[in-house]
Amino acid sequence: MEIGDGGTASVEFYNMCYNNGKDVREALLKYCELDTLAEVMIVEKLKGLI
C-alpha cells in the first residue's frame, strides 16, 4: 500500500484504529505487559546493588 497524501493517511489511520481495534488493543496490552516486566526486572537488579 502506498500513501501519497494526507487525506489517505488520515483514512488509513482511522481504519487501523477502528477496524482492527481489538487486534490493536491486544497488541498494546502485550507490549505494556512486557515493558512493565522489564521495568520490574531492572528495579530488582538495582535493589540487589544497594
Image (cartoon, helix red, strand yellow):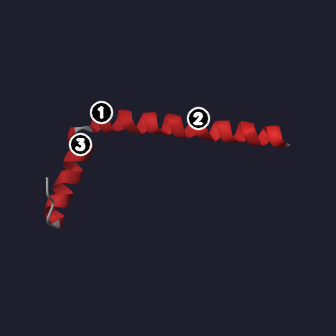
Image quadrant containing the C terminus: top right
Q: Nearer the viewer, residue 20 or 46?
A: 46
Q: Nearer the viewer, residue 11 or 38?
A: 38
Alpha carbon separation for disc pair 3 and 1:
9 Å
Farthest-out residue, bottom = 5
x, y (%) of residue 2? 14, 57
Residue picked out by circle 2? 37
On the image, the x and y values in percent for residue 30 come to 44, 33
Q: Nearer the viewer, mark 3 or mark 2?
A: 2
Residue neighbourhood size for the residue with mark 1, other residues' Cα within 10 Å, grouped as few (<14), some (14–19), many (≥20): few
Mark 3 or mark 2: whose residue is earlier in sequence: 3
> Neighbour class for label 3 at 10 Å: few (<14), some, many (≥20)?
few
Q: How many residues crowd mark 2 within 10 Å: few (<14), some (14–19), many (20+)? A: few
Q: CA distance from mark 1 to mark 2?
A: 23 Å
The secondary structure type at the circle numbered 2 is helix
Hey, what amino acid is under mark 1?
Lys
Left or right: 7 with respect to 50? left
